[in-house]
Image (cartoon, rainbow, N blue to C red):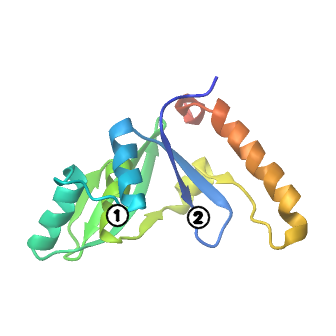
Amino acid sequence: MPSSQPIVLLREVGGERYLPIWIGAAEASAIAFAQQGMEPPRPLTHDLFAETIRVLGHTLSQVRIVNLTDGVFEAILVFDDKTEISARPSDSIALALRTGTPVFCTEEILAEAGIPVPDSENEDDEVVEEEEVERFREFLDHVTPEDFDKS
């Protein structure tokens, strides 16, 4: 049975893996707003935090997905002065989108939770690619956060 819980898919740069992270509805909306370039009349929480960082004279230099414990991902916000703050990946991604900050993930987490979806290189592979995408969609329709519980 498909889950109605939102999911964000982070794609590996230069690779074929995707990292699925289940997120809350509010964070999904915040991420979607940022992706679509929507600016609300009043700042949302992530907008407010991004503006606060800017006004205080700092920048968010990177977001790192650093841990996966019992199916729960953990992230770290890294600032220009090397300050690190623990955060939820969903909030971190929403903030990264607003600040143009890169998101990184450890190889260990990608190896454990990443899902390979090969890219096709030419038009002859379009049918194969469509089949892969369809299998990936089927996987997403049936996978639950508990499927990643390693205990």
User: Left of 55 or right of it: where is 141?
Assistant: right
Q: Among all residues in the image, which is located at the extreme front?
A: 41
Which residue is disc 2 drawn over?
12
- Residue neighbourhood size for the residue with mark 2, other residues' Cα within 10 Å, grouped as few (<14), some (14–19), many (≥20): some
Asked whether 9 or 19 is in front, the reply is 9
Image x and y of residue 102, in percent: 41, 70
The kind of residue tagged 2 is Glu
User: Left of 58 or right of it: where is 16?
Assistant: right
User: Hey, which quadrant is residue 128 in on the image?
Assistant: bottom right
Asked whether 97 or 77 is in front, the reply is 97
Image x and y of residue 26, in percent: 33, 40
Image x and y of residue 116, in percent: 70, 55
Q: Which mark is residue 96?
A: 1
Task: State which quarter of the image contains the N terminus.
Answer: top right
Q: Among all residues in the image, which is located at the extreme top?
A: 1
Q: Which residue does the image show at 36% across and 59% down from the upper left? A: 34
Q: Among all residues in the image, which is located at the extreme left?
A: 56
User: Hey, which quadrant is residue 49 in on the image?
Assistant: bottom left
- Residue neighbourhood size for the residue with mark 1, other residues' Cα within 10 Å, grouped as few (<14), some (14–19), many (≥20): many
Task: State which quarter of the image contains the C terminus.
Answer: top right
User: Hey, which quadrant is residue 126 in on the image?
Assistant: bottom right
**Cα–Cα gap, marks 1 and 2:** 16 Å
Q: Earlier in the sequence, mark 1 or mark 2?
A: 2
Q: Which mark is residue 48?
A: none
Q: Which residue does the image show at 57% across and 30% down from the upper left? A: 144
Q: Which residue does the image show at 20% across and 68% down from the upper left? A: 83
User: Left of 143 or right of it: where is 46?
Assistant: left
The kind of residue tagged 1 is Ala
